[in-house]
Every structure is written in structure tokens, then in C-alpha cells.
Image: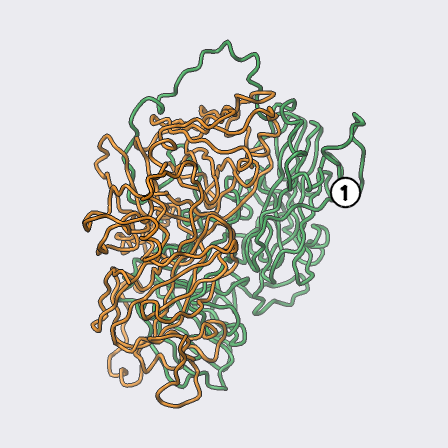
Chain colours: A green, B orange
Amino acid sequence: MTFRKRRDGASPPYEDVAGNGLLNRRALLGRGIVLAGAASAGVGASLTGAAAEPLKNDQWSLEMGSVVPAYQVPSRFEKDVIRTRSNPNNEFRNSHARTPHHLLQGTVTPNGLFFSICHSGLPDIDPAQHKLVVHGLVKQPMVYTVESLERYPMVTRMHFVECAGNSAPMFSSAPLQVTAQALHGLASNAEWTGVLLSTLLDEVGIDPKAKWILAEGADSLGLSRSVPIKMALDDVMVALYQNGERIQPGNGYPMRLLVPGCQGNMNVKYLRRLKLIDQPGMTFYEAKTYSQILPTGKSWLFHFTMEVKSFITHPSFGHSLKGPGHYEISGIAYSGNGRIAKVMVSADGGKSWAEAALQGPINPKAFTRFRMPWRWDGQPVVLQSRAWDEAGNVQPLRAEFVAARGQTEKPVTSPLAFPNQHYNSITSWGIDNAGSIKHVYA
Amino acid sequence: MTFRKRRDGASPPYEDVAGNGLLNRRALLGRGIVLAGAASAGVGASLTGAAAEPLKNDQWSLEMGSVVPAYQVPSRFEKDVIRTRSNPNNEFRNSHARTPHHLLQGTVTPNGLFFSICHSGLPDIDPAQHKLVVHGLVKQPMVYTVESLERYPMVTRMHFVECAGNSAPMFSSAPLQVTAQALHGLASNAEWTGVLLSTLLDEVGIDPKAKWILAEGADSLGLSRSVPIKMALDDVMVALYQNGERIQPGNGYPMRLLVPGCQGNMNVKYLRRLKLIDQPGMTFYEAKTYSQILPTGKSWLFHFTMEVKSFITHPSFGHSLKGPGHYEISGIAYSGNGRIAKVMVSADGGKSWAEAALQGPINPKAFTRFRMPWRWDGQPVVLQSRAWDEAGNVQPLRAEFVAARGQTEKPVTSPLAFPNQHYNSITSWGIDNAGSIKHVYA
């Protein structure tokens, strides 16, 4: 880690803490030291000298506005802040809809933009007809409706959900020139409310022979995955609410299994059945799709947990810098193993690193926003982030990751349909002296 | 506080902690003691004996579903989970849109259902044209755009916003038979991201003569309110994002002042101007509307902070109980003075109380969900909640509150247009032996 003095020799309101203008994160924490230099850097614009331009009201300041709707939607000026879709014509295959991380801030993914993968379209489930059956190796099989689950003790928790195939374009041997949405948009974060699965398992009574639970969805795919009983008795819930309102149709309405920190596919949507069994179901999605074959020829079977990861969302591909001066670097970090412990940021492609500020409260298995003050001097830079979790895991460097997990032989041009999963290495954004941003490997 | 033994004399999986079936909140915290009795109480339904009914697939399990949208919206079966509006035809007056608390869970209010009050409709503001001017008693007046604010250090924080007139129907001398939405729907809670006002004030430089800041909106109302400089330098922000995406049009798009814990009206939407001044502006909304006249004849001028409050959302008016057995009582608590410290719940109209479980993380000046396990014996009960905040404030009993603040001489039948503000006393739900729920004063 390098520290250098400000060139002007003044007592530092901004202390450089790593190469290419990364500033001490203390600059974010209080007033008095943050933006004194921003005016001269052209972040805001001085009013002095602009007084010759007559003030006028904009049209919206002069007329009655439009009707207030019963259910709010974003401004028409935000029409491009949407999920990108892999199957907009609803052909007879799966549909990905990716979260636009580069256009969002904070940690909550709003429900309209929460990612979804549907394998047979959006089912139109009537919650008054939908039932959840819990059976198999239990003392008393039970059937639950939305209405009956409402009477049970609930929990409310912030958790991310991430597809195991998220970030798969990063396996390409050359970096794809696409946004953080295209690279990492199959992960989102929400406040979920529901009934702990342990509560329902207590009610049905677990037969000691039961070691796994087969969870099955009610859409026409009938997707099913096996969850170890031990995991099911921890923080797994049957979720009914997403950010306060009922779960979205693309996210499992009227109920889904939430298996915090684990492959998205295990968080079975449209949950209709939980069967307690003595061995895993070896279903299609666990025996084939998510049994990742490693370069060694071995495969990962029941490799559930999504590893610690981070990526910078601001600035990133799709943005451009408007000249030298102060910027905030920020991004998202998360880990299926618990809380984020630390995020380091580099502006010189990994030669020097500085610790970012983490936005609290830091929830386990949830998005954490990291922030780093930065003064860009107009020269080319490479921005990177690297996260650590409370379990001691660290996001691997790209060279380490590729050595262990491989990459494609030839560069790939489409962000879709990569055969590989569980990418959790570093994302690098290269910025040239014109302020344009490229995806690079560094 | 009364404790009574279970009638069956068994060792208590549920320990009664107050009258009419309130159970120890430890029942919420772990497995093993929670719902063992629920099956017999008919919460879920046993499958035994129901095997004679042939299993069949629902229609949505048999066919390809519909197209995945670019921006998700709730299921059509949730069409009644909407904001109730006071001005659905957009007549030339203000418009209230209330949050349906009795239909939501958790703590986040989803953006579609966040309350709004617009005095001249929804302005259609182009964020590329919108400017925020900071001027008056400053060393360097500045103008900010959405784009320039994006470069400043940001913070992300969970905070409620509440209209000072929220809960005003509770001033009626007889209880209105309406939902928690109609009574308390002018308060909502979101994750806000923006630039601390202190950051911008550092940049413009505060003239020592400046004591107040006049904040003005860009809609045609041109609403303005005065904020003390000292408060502005604390946790006030210029918010750009609401639950991760840009602020909703009804909530101030593209930027609003967020003054955590203070009257909603001070959180000036469509923020276009901050003028530093040496005395308060004495604007319409502070000199008249929100200068509450007290029974003593004195008035509250610049009475900003929204007091500690709680109300039960589940069960509440609009719901009904389906027979005796286990239920969860839950609701929302919040205070403009900081974190919620404690919520007590009563099922016997205040004769006995028990402490509810609080859902963490408990954020300052934000909704906190409280939960209480409850076994209803089918007899009439009155449910109440009462909250304490970390500053030591307690929600007043209704008799105390009415003695200090008064109530209407005659019962009022409409929940709209009450002249009174800052109601923070207790809400009571009376449940009869048929399980129907009324709003009562107790």
C-alpha cells in the first residue's frame, strides 16, 4: 500500500491512501473534509458570473401535475432503468431478467428490478387455491395455504439471492464489453418476510430417518431441489413477502423457499411441496445443471454456497467520466457465508489497495454497499474491488481463479449461456484519459 | 402482569406472559417450542384422512406462463393492495395516497405503495433540466444537477417519512371504523441514498450569520419550509434514490430533502432551492398549517419531530380471525427521536402487558416490526401496542393524550381533513367472539 503527499503540500483534507487518487475513507465519515475542492474540480457549478442568465421557471413549476396513481411507478425519464431480458418474446425456453446494478444505488433491489429466471414463463397462481404440502418422512403430513401461513410466527430478514450462473460471462478468455447488469445482474437483494421452515418442520415432526428435503415448485417446470435437513433447520424460510409486499410473480408468488446464501435455483419459487427424504432427490438441476465439472475432471455435487464477491457499480461500463476531479467509487459486496468483513479498492489495477467504507447495517448474506472517495487526475486507471467475509474467505485474484477454475479457449461475445458457474473473482474497469470505461482483465 | 398455567397442566411449550393468551416472545426465537399445538388449533390442516381426495395439478402447473416483464409488477391477485387516494380525479387540490399497512409485512414500504401527498399533482420533471441552487448566506453560491450530485460521497440509510397529519382521524371523539391504512397510512419507510446536506454546505461555505435554510420545491406549489442549520448539519440529506432506484414521482423525483424523523412536509420534494437565511422564512406551511394550536391556546411553532408511535397491523380492522388458536400479533413502531427501545403488547385492553420481540436490525428513525405470539381462546379481546424509544419517550395512553391534546366534540365520520396533528397515542382493536375486528378506544 502506497501513501503519497498532496502535490500542493497543504495539510491534507484528502489523504491519498493508494495509487491513482484513492482517498482515505475517513473523508466519507464526517463533514469538514470532504468536498472543499470539488467546486474547483467542476462537480457543482459556481453561480458567480452566471447571474446574467435570467431565472425562469420550468414548465413543471407552472402547471398542475398529473394524477397520483394508486400504485406508483418510476418516472418516464427512467424508462431505460429496466431488467434486460433473454427471452422477451416468451419463446418456449427459459427467461432471464437482469438487475441494472450500474443504474441503482444503496443495497435494496426494488421489486420492479429484482432479477428473475423463469423456466416456463410467469405462472398465474391464484393464492386462494395454492397449497404447500409437507410430507414424506414426517410424523404428521400437513397442508398449508397462504392464509394459514399468515398465522404463524414470521421473521423479516434482508438477504441476497444469486443465480449460480451469475457472472458466468467472466469465464470468457477476453473481457466482454458489457455492463455490470450483463455480467452480474443475476443477483439481487431484498427484505424477505415469511415463516421459518424450522417452525413448520416442528409442527409436522421430523422422522429421524429424514436427511434431506425435496422442494418442488408449482409452475409447469415443476423444478425441484434437495436441501439438507440441517440447513433447513437453520435460516431457511418459506417467504411470503418481498420488500414489504407480496412476492413478485417472477420471484415465486405466492410463496418461495428462501435458502439464504445458496444458489438461486435452490430458493424454489411457487413452492408447493416439501418432501422429507432419506437421501437427495438427484433432480435434474442438482445432478446435471448445477453439478459443475471442474478442470480436474471432478465435479461439484451439492456445492450450494455462493462465494464472497464484489464488483464496482459506479463508475462502470456504460458510464463515462466528465473530466478530472472528485468522484465516488461504489459497489456491492456479499457472501453466502455471512457478513462482509472488508472491501479493498484499487485504482491502479491491483498494485496498491485501500480499504473502502462499508455502509451499515451490515446484514449477513445480504448486499453491502462499499464506498471510496477518489480524485481522478485524468490519467488512465484500472478500478478494482476485492471483498472479504466474516468467515475469512477472500475474493480470489483473477489469475488464481482461472488457474483453479479455467476459462473459455476462445473469447465469447455473448453474455448468455456460459457453461460455467460460481465465478467470484475480481471485475476490473479500465478508464482512459478521455474518461471512457472498458471492461478489462487486470 | 399476570402469568397463568396452561389448563392441561403440561410443561409449557408456550408460557403465558399477559392476559388473554399473549405468549412469551421467546416462542419466536427458536425452534422446538413454537407451533407444536398449531395443528390441533387448525392453523395448517392435517393431510391424514384427506387422502381420499385425488391430487390434481392446478392449471398453472400444466401450461407455459406469460412473458417476463422488463419492470415487474405485483400479481393481478394483489389488485386491492394499493394506496387509497383522496383525489383520484386530480381535482385542483391536494392528493393523499395512503400506504396499506394492514396488507404489508416487514419494515420496507415498497416504492409502489409508499405514501404521498401532492399539493398540485405529480410534476413531470426532466432530471436533465432540473437544478438545485444553494445560495443566500454562503461564501460561494452553487448550482447542482442530478449528474453532478452523482459524483459526491453518498450515504444509504433506512428512514421513515410521516406526515404530521398522519393518524389525525384518531382525534375523533368516537373511533372510526376504518383500516390502519386510513388511520396511519401517511407514514412509510424506505432505504434512501443521497448526499448529506452537510457535504454541500461545506462546499458552499456557511456564512456565520446563517441560522436557517429555506428549502423550496420545483412543483407548481413551490412548497417551502425552514430547517435550522444545526439540524441540516446532522443527518439531513439530498436524497436521489429510494429503495435502490430513483425516487418515485410522488416522492420527489428527481431529488428531495430528507429530514429524518421530522414532519413529512419538511422533506421538501422536487428540491430546487436551499437558501441560507438568518431567520426562519415563516412560510405558509410552517406559520399556518403546521403551527398546531393547542387546547391551551398556545401553538406549536417549529415543532418538527414526529413522536414515538406504534400500531398493530396484524390482526387489525379489515381482517377477521378464523376461530380460536394461534396467531401472530405484529405491527410497526417508530420514533423521530431515534431507535425503538421496547414495544409492549396487551390483549386485554391495557390491564396486562407483555414485551414484544423486535425485528432487527433496529435502525434509528425507521420502522421497526414487532411480533408477539398469541393464542386466542375465542373470547372477546382488545389488542393494543405501546412503544418506547431510546431517548426515553413513551407512547402516551389515550386518556393522557386526549387530556393534553383534546379531541373533536362530535364523532367524525370521514378520515379526511382533520385539523389536528401529531397524534401518537395508542390504537386499539376489539375482537368479538366471532373473530370480527373493530376499532375501539380502550
**Residue under mark 1: which chain is it in?**
A
Q: As rendered, which of A433 and A300 lies closer to the eye?
A: A433
Q: Position of residue B121 (x, y in %)?
A: 30, 32
Residue beneath the point at 52% across and 49% down:
A107
Check disc 1 and report its element: helix, strand or loop: loop
| Residue A137 visible in rendering | no
Three-letter code, disc 1: Ser
Query: Which quadrant would the C terminus of chain B be assigned to in this image?
Result: bottom left
How many labels were placed on the picture? 1
In the picture as drawn, the residue positioned furthest to the front comes out as B296
Q: Is residue B25 above or below residue B150?
A: below
Residue beneath the point at 47% across and 51% down:
B366
Q: As rendered, which of B278 and A70 lies closer to the eye?
A: B278
Question: Is the residue marked by circle 1 packed among few (<14), some (14-19), or many (20+) residues within 10 Å?
Answer: some
Q: As rendered, which of B89 and B410 lies closer to the eye?
A: B410
Q: As rendered, which of B152 and A354 lies closer to the eye?
A: B152
Q: Position of residue A272 (x, y in %)?
A: 36, 69
Q: Is residue B83 left or right of residue B264?
A: left
Query: Which quadrant would the N terminus of chain B be assigned to in this image?
Result: bottom left
Q: Is residue A323 above or below residue B28?
A: above
Q: Is residue B79 left or right of residue B152?
A: left
Q: Position of residue B434 (x, y in %)?
A: 20, 72
Q: Position of residue A423 (x, y in %)?
A: 61, 54
Residue underneath mark 1: A352
Q: Quadrant of residue A141?
A: bottom left
Q: Is residue B411 left or right of residue B220?
A: left
| Residue A282 visible in rendering | yes
Q: Quadrant of residue A374?
A: top right
In the picture as drawn, the residue positioned furthest to the top comes out as A52
